[in-house]
Image: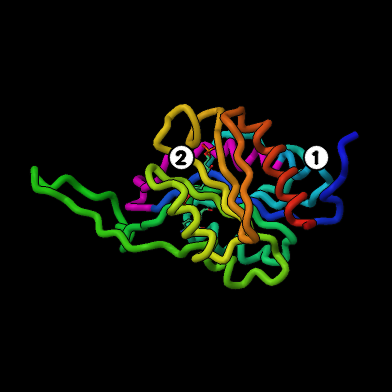
Amino acid sequence: SMEQSLAGKKVLITAGPTQEAIDPIRYLTNHSSGKMGYAIAEAAAARGADVVLVSGPVSLPAPGNVTRIDVESTRDMFEAVKDHMDADLGIFTAAVSDFTPREVHGSKMKKQDGREVSIELKETQDILQYVGAHKGGMFVVGFAAETDNVREYAAGKLKKKNADCIVMNDVSNKEIGMNSDENEVVMLFKNGGEQAYPRMDKQTLGIQIIETIVKRWND
Ligand code: PMT
């Protein structure tokens, strides 16, 4: 049987995209499928963890032995995360929208006879940054999805968000990262050192990421 290295540990995982309402029928979102986060949730549950998976709208079934909380907006995801700040380990794979419409139209926006229409956006709450600032004993793992200067931005996020680890992936490559079945990452640790994983399926990579977190967390 698999080593129960996370027995007795509560693990909070976010996954998938968020949806930011524009009007009653339209929203702003991204291409995240939830596959990476769900694979990590499955790997953590298989090691005996008590897993809470806060998930944006995706079409995946919940892994067994995982408590899934379904959310739509960044605001909903933030509220769900705040309810589970007692987790021992937090892994934030969700592709949270950085922006949300400044106001949600109460009724369907109408065409303007050919005139341009604009939607004003404001920044959303940064969930990972909040968690980093209030983490107590939680070991915090963030993700960084970048299309360029990947390493530089990822290292910046590790510091700014007070994470213990950032898993960086290059989402400019359609073969890996968002909505594909495979990913290729480099894990950067606050205490120095890194772990690179070549391209592989997200299921296998989820197991590798969990194994590396457990090892580093115990050091
Ligand atoms: O879902 P898949 O199709 O399998 O794709 C996986 C993935 C590419 C989405 C995943 O591997 C990944 O990189 N997730 C993070 C995506 C992202 O939003 O990265 P970011 O660099 O914008 O954000 C950095 C970190 O801050 C992330 O941990 C993110 O969850 C968090 N964040 C960002 C914005 C915000 N308002 N709140 C946050 O908590």
Nearer-the-camera pick, 33 or 185? 185
Residue 148 in sight here: yes
- In the displayed structure, does residue 173 sit left or right of residue 85? left
Nearer-the-camera pick, 11 or 161? 161
Residue lying at 56% horizontally and 40% vertically, measured from the top left = 185
Q: Amino acid at mark 2?
A: Asp
Mark 2 vs 1, N-terminal side: 1
8 drawn magenta: no
In the picture, the disc for residue 170 is 2
Q: Is residue 76 above or below residue 44?
A: below
Report the mark closest to the observer, 2 or 1.
2
Q: CA distance from mark 2 to mark 1?
A: 28 Å
Q: Which residues are magenta?
A: 21-41
Residue 139 location (% of width, % of height): 69, 61
Mark 2 Cα-neighbour bin, 10 Å: few <14, some 14–19, many ≥20 = many
Name the residue carrying label 1. 46
- In the displayed structure, does residue 160 sit left or right of residue 47? left
Whether the residues at callouts 2 and 1 have beta carbons within 8 Å, the answer is no
